[in-house]
Amino acid sequence: MKVKDIVEILNARVVVGQNLLESEVELAFSSDLMSDVLTVETENLMLLTGLANLQTIRTAEMSDINKIIFVRRKKVNEEMKRLAEENDMILIECDYSMFKASGILYQHGVKPVY
C-alpha cells in the first residue's frame, strides 16, 4: 500500500516528507516502547506510536525506519521535523488511537511484523 493511501484512510496529516507519499508500505509495527522498536529487524517498516519526542526519531533512524505515524493526536515539534528532514523520513499525525489505526491498516492489507 502506498503511504498516500494510508494517509487518506487514516484521515491523517503529513507533517514532513511529502516526497515519500508514493513509497510502498507492506509491514507496520505499533509501539510506544522504543526498546521494542529497536528489536525489530525488518525493512520497509512503518512505525505507529504515541511517543512524540526526539527519541522516537532517533530510534527510528537507528532502526532504518523512515515512516512514522503519531497516533492519539500527538503533535510533531520543530526539532523532530528538522531531524526527520535530515534523515529523509515521513512524519504523519493521526487523531485515531493506536488500536484503531492499526486495525484499519490491517483491514487494508498492511501486515504485522509478527
Image (cartoon, rainbow, N blue to C red):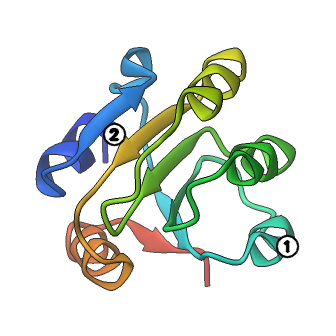
In the image: residue 35, left or right of residue 72:
right
Q: Amino acid at mark 2?
A: Val
Badge 2 element: helix
Residue 20, position as x, y percentages in the image: 43, 23
Q: Amino acid at mark 1?
A: Thr
Residue 14 percent location from the top left of the image: 31, 33
Height in image: 43 above or below 105?
above
Q: Residues within 10 Å of mark 2 (few under 14, many from 20)?
A: many
Q: Nearer the viewer, residue 76 or 67?
A: 76
Query: Where does label 2 land, which residue?
Result: 3
Side of 5 relative to 91 (left or right) = left
Q: Determine the image quadrant of residue 111.
A: bottom left
Residue at image location 84% in from the left, 74% down from the top = 35
Disc 2 from disc 1: Cα separation: 23 Å
Q: Position of residue 66 (x, y in %)?
A: 62, 38
Name the N-terminal-most of marks 2 and 1.
2
Callout 2–callout 1 Cβ contact below 8 Å: no
Location of residue 8 by image quarter = top left
Residue at label 1? 39
Residue 42 position in % (x across, y down): 73, 59
Q: In the picture, residue 3 is in which quadrant?
A: top left
Residue 18: mark:
none
